[in-house]
Amino acid sequence: MQASKTITRTSQIVGACLFLSAAAMVATFVLFQQAEKDLETAFEQRYSSYLLADELRQSSDDLTRFARSYVATGDERFKEMYNQILAIRNGDAPRPKGYNRIYWDFVAATGEPPRGTGKAVSLSELMREAGFTEAEFAKLEKAQANSDGLVKLETKAMGVVGDGDASAGELREARKLLFGEEYHTYKASIMKPIDEFFVMLDQRTAGAVEAARSRVSMYSWMFGISITVAVLLGLLAGLGLYSRVLRPVSRLRDAMLSLSENKRDTDIPAVDNRDEIGEMARATEVFKTNMEETDRLREQQAEQERQAAEERRASMHKLADGFEGSVGAVVDNVAASSGQLEELSQTLSHHADKTKTESTAVSSAAEQAASNLQAVASATEELSTSVREIASQAEQSAQIAQQASDQSVRTTETIQGLATAADRIGQVVTLINDIAEQTNLLALNATIEAARAGEAGKGFAVVAQEVKTLAEQTGKATQDIQHQIEAIQGETREAVSAIDGISNTVKHINESVAAISSAVQEQEATTGEIARNIEDVTKASETVAQSISGVRDIAEETNQSAERLRSESATFQSGAKELRGEVDRFLGEVRAA
């Protein structure tokens, strides 16, 4: 039982390995996706941090620019924009949208903000939300502390201009405060920690980006390795299944197919395997052994049955030979006697029939002669009347013959038109036959091209063959039509010739009508003489008929007796033949058993 589960256990192990490799591949893919998101977040944080830091630097420059512009021009707009920059940076005023883009240059030029505003939030709070470190804030606080001197200097200069009654010297002194060496010294002391802040910010965000990029690279490698491991495990599993399962099963299947085809010399593979396939192979081996034993028993039984059948057949043949010798001769003698009796009855019947036939013929001839003579007598009396009627009908016949002559002319013209139409039909049939021959030729060419095309031209070859068949059928049909047309033309010519003959005959009829009129008069005189002669012959015929009637009655009685004898002999002979057939059938069945 333990050995029979080898393949199952192997399949479970392979499945577990494939599952673990798939799980590892999914896990590394998820980590890779998360690392890519972290890298994207690091890039976004680096960029947003740079924008906030750049806003701090840009706002410092804008404060300097508007302070100088106010001192130089005394325009209150520049002072107001100076104060707005401080209010926005400290969170006291709403922050403009897109503040990192160009803003104060447009306000200075037009007096109107280029975009709307959002909520009020200080720059330091935005920096904390962006993840600025305490060390970075320390640099900013240092810059803030260093800016006090610069603010006092700017406030002093702007205060001189704000009094409105400053002298030219005081204005010149105020401008000197914003453009002098002291101003630049304060400015540099502020920008130095800001510059250090930029360096720290760049290092921090660059490190975060690099760390995220390293994780992406690491998880990418891990994902590739997991895919490679999964593929290798799949290949190894496939090779293992093929070598341990598929190939033995395929060989075992071939062996089973050979056994199903009664190939008893087939070797059963994998009989020694200690797994499920080995069990199947051993079961197949038992099946093969049982088949061989069954064949041996079947052959042994067939041989025994054959010997018993031979012995039984020999006994039956011996019995049949004895029966045929004792009974067959008697049956043959009976059949021969009945045949001779039938021949004698047929001879007697033949002579009686002949006598009856001859007497009947003589009697019929006599009666017919008497009847004919009587009819001739009656006909003679009517002949005179008919002769006069013939003269009248002869004149009408002449008129009808003339009409027939005219009709034959019209019929000739109609048949000539029919012959012309038949000729035209023959031309059309010839054209159809030519088209059929061309179609047959095209179909033959298409069949050749389809044969050259190979497998792709089989469908076209079938269509070409159908077209060729239709063309051949069309050709045969046109030939049949041509033959019919030729027959019609021949019949038409014969009809024309016949009608010409009819016309000539009608002319001869006209000529004969005149001759009939003169012959009628001569016929009337002859009719009276014929009537007298017929009366004498009729009396002689009646005497002959009475004599023949007695002979016919005697022949009829003889024929009836011969017929009864022939019927009995035929029945006797039929029984003898039936008996012989039954004997032969019985002997045949006995010998065949």
Image: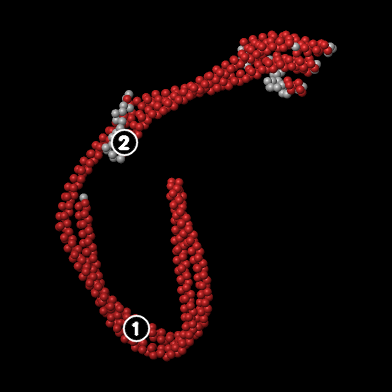
Q: Is residue 80 visible?
A: no
Whether residue 340 sits left or right of residue 209 in the image: it is left
Report the number of numbered marks: 2
**Residue at the disc numbered 2:** 255
Q: Position of residue 181 (x, y in %)?
A: 73, 11
Q: Nearer the viewer, residue 184 or 487?
A: 184
Q: Nearer the viewer, residue 152 or 516?
A: 152
Q: Position of residue 394 (x, y in %)?
A: 48, 84
Q: Is residue 576 visible?
A: yes
**Residue at the disc numbered 1:** 370
Residue under the point 31% across and 38% down: 258
Q: Quadrant of residue 76?
A: top right
Residue under the point 44% across and 56% down: 469
Residue 450 vs 20, above or below: the answer is below
Q: Amino acid at mark 1?
A: Ala
Residue under the point 23% across and 64% down: 571
Residue under the point 59% across and 15% down: 204
